[in-house]
Image (tube, rainbow, N blue to C red):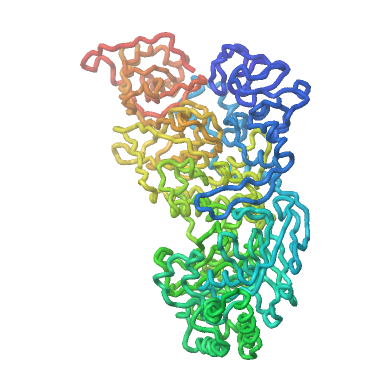
Amino acid sequence: MARCIKCNNELKPGNEFCSKCGTANKQIVKSTPGFSCPGCGANIPEGIINCTNCGRPVPQTISSIQTQSIACPSCGAYNYPDTSYCMSCGRPMPTVAEIQKQQIYSARPVRKSKNALIFSGVAVVLIITLIVGLWKPGYIWQWIDNDRIVRTEKNIVENKGKNNKENSGSNANADSNQDVSVLSEEWMSEYLSTDPGTNPAPMPISGTKTFKATPTDGLTISASENALDKEREFTAEKISDDKIMNITEQYVDANWLLLGGFKVNGGMNSDERMPGLINVEMDLSKLDIDQELWEFAQAIRIGDDGSVSLLPSKVNGSVLSCQTSQNSIIGAIIIGLAAGTGVQHLIERGHEGLDSLYMGIKFHHIVYKGENASYDVYWPETLLSAELKQYSEKIATIMEKYGLNPNGSLNFAAIQATKDFKSGYEMMGYLNGIKKALYSDPDYVELARKMKDVDWSQANYWPAEVVQTTRALGLADTYLFGVRGFDTPGYNVDIVVLDKWPEGHGKETLGISMNLYTYRPFIHINAGNKTKMPHSATGKGTVATSNLILTITHELFHVVQSRAVTFDSDEFTMFWEAMAVSLEKEAFDYFSSEAGGKVIDPTQTTVLTDRNYFEYLYSRSLLEPSLWNNNGDNKEYLRNHGYIASHWIDFLRDRYYAGNPNDFIASLLKRFSLSSRVSGDIFNLMLRQQTANSTDPSFGQPYSKDFIAFCQKNYNAMYSRIQYTTPKIEDIKLDADNPMAEINIKWQPLSIAFQDFRIDSKGADGKPVEYRLAVKGKLPWDNYFITRNFVDGSKTTTVDFDKEIFMLPVSTSGLITLMEIQAQIEEVTADEQSATYQVYLLRQPEEPTIEIDEDYLVITPPDWSIPDPRDILSGYDIIITGPGGAEYRHREEVSLAEVEIPLKDIKPKDKSKVSEDEEDEYTAYIVERIDMPDGSSEYGPNGKVAKLGDELRFEDVIGQYDMVQNVSNFQTP
């Protein structure tokens, strides 16, 4: 059997051109035992290494491969050791050296950045999984199944064998070759009703075992399975008194005091961290810390780079337990009770915009412990009322009693108290005495215990804005880390409640997360916002409390996301927002339900982030800014693009995780944290791997089909944003004077584009007249997933991707909207990134002139509806109704010459059925014709009808005509 050398379509005997793709097949390859080329589909006899048509490597039988063969990590086919691309699927192959070097596991590479923030030291991943996850196809896949995205088998059969005689005007076959629209309800219901075959790719893991060790007396380190990137040896040493005092001086504005600790080393560089958290247990008695201080101790991490983070910790007797993932000093501290944190300390931690607003103002600092994580909550003393300040005054009196200055930080007070001592040993000895006396004072201890009690503090000490913030924080903590199961940050997150709002944060913003990708991310809350911030400690169920709950949930999730990466990139912004806004809606549904305590009124949807920004998807690839053209890729632009991408997250969740929707974003974030992020389409790659991770050569199909269904579902929302584009998308006007428009299309995977056509086809009476649009120009990309869809009211027609000319149905509408959907995922070279095609308006032709000249019917056609008819038209048909009502057709080429048709060919054979009154009654109209490459014909709208009675003969008409065409052998259908 002969097959097309380009698309592998079966060819009928004698065919020189493929009926599917139109390729000339002068050299036909007969089907013989062998393989089909994975690139072009041509049949390749067994033993051939490279395709004789396109030159790509072709698959081989196992017996023909050398014994040192390498299995393709994508499709499993065997390849020669020196093969660069798989001979079966075309994806890149690992070299022998790479496999020998990496063996089974490969450590995650350390990424360097100019800011030297925090870098990758995360999981060792399975090398095969890594290759499958990050490699792109070596070429654009052309082996795609023939499903209903483009056409139906029924429609294909109907179109075969059509000829001129079967086409009798626009009404006869206007819809006969229309494909099932990819925007139609029929296609969507059929596609979405099928099982999507959820098949997430395996998560890369390190494979390390659980361990527990005691590197030094008083310190125990342990980790769960896969928490380490590889087997490591940990060492630790107790920090000296001199080191403690150096740290005290270094962080003089911090309102905490270091009691003791250990320097822990896991053999990592300062810019590395573990994929999981390491458990640390410190025996405070081994650090010579007085028992009076144990219950008030908190854990702190001081990194090699000077970064400081308080760690979630618990005290059980003398043991203080916490977690970390880096080399660092792990110590125990006590926190001052008074407002002693200097603004400079917050500025050093990255809190922007506070220096000018809070110069000279002290901040209160408390550790708020949620059910799952801990938070350092700060607020300025300016938020305290006179009534609340009474507790600060009591604390100041007690501190002065023991020689500590209450007007600054606890570290500052310690430095002042020991300024006359020279050695750290002497300083620590003196301070230990003061600390023991202070925490033996019953009044001070009573206040310290009360301030640790959240209920007491919310009722008696904290400002109303802090009370509401901590309540919302507790709800967000329970939802994110309890209900949803996200990994906790592993450190105390700074939450700063501000009554003065930095200008750079946005005037109406209620909350903002900043300093991400480091170990000091923080959240600012705008307590000064008059409308969005609740200012009553007892307020519940209001729009303001709902706003605060969702804001903190959203921003805290950004902090959770930041732990998934170890270097900064603006491009992360859109992916972060896509997940966060989607999760925000999920949180809204939870908090407004019985399970969530109904703390949010379900009718208060105005508190949700506005994500109706679909114009940011116009002509820009979804989640791939590297493919965008002429865009303002600033953070605001990326953020808004992320808002519309959240709809895509929702769609995939509902399609693939309908039974367990809470798992999708958590699994997606986990997968992202374990990826190397070197691929340009990393975000879409993660989504593909987490949904229908198909491993066959058409692996992109489910994702592309999903995108088309997504566009169908959101068509109205997408189209409604056409007015907000910059620059504005101007309407294209098609009328008698301008019946053609040229459309430019850019290769933009996973994008949409809209264009409105304003059609003026009204008749002389101002009423709508029928017309048809013809689309000319086959796109140069042989891709099923690039669709051109013309929307006419409730009806949508999809242009057949492999037709040079395509006709839309008859219409009278004044508005037709073109929606281009590019659902492909491949990239192309620079010289293949644009194409053009034309849209023609075929209006209703005027009536022809009809006369009788002796034995001939003479017809003079009207002018064409297209100024240059040969650009699109093949000619026209004359439809004649003769005596007795019989219809006759006559075909003409592109010419306006008179046509003479013998009356004998039109006269009915049985004249007895024609009355004398009907003997010379004739009507005629024309339809403009386009002959298709497959031999069929398409027609414009039916023309106006001209009528001739027996009272008008040719000799009654004055004048002569020089252009006469004699017609013979005229036959009726």
Give the x, y percent position of residue 735: 32, 35
Q: Residue at x 73, y 33 (%)?
A: 76
Q: Is residue 409 above or below residue 912?
A: below
Q: Give the farthest residue toward the left.
A: 958
Q: Is residue 604 above or below residue 943?
A: below
Q: Is residue 318 above or below residue 34?
A: below
In-front residue for pair 24/356: 356
Give the x, y percent position of residue 343: 47, 72
Q: Give the quarter of the image for residue 903.
A: top left
Give the x, y percent position of residue 523: 52, 66
Q: Is residue 48 above or below residue 459?
A: above
Count of numbered circles on the image? 0
Relative to 103, 518 lies left or right = left
Q: Residue at x 68, y 54 (%)?
A: 267
In-front residue for pair 687/250: 250
User: Residue 506: in sight, yes or no?
Assistant: yes
Give the x, y percent position of residue 680: 54, 41
User: Residue 413: in sight, yes or no?
Assistant: no
Q: Which quadrant would the N terminus be assigned to in this image? A: top right
Q: Residue at x 41, y 33 (%)?
A: 772
Relative to 949, 627 lies left or right = right
Q: Give the farthest residue toward the front.
A: 422
Q: Residue at x 43, y 35 (%)?
A: 745
Q: Give the quarter of the image for residue 244.
A: bottom right
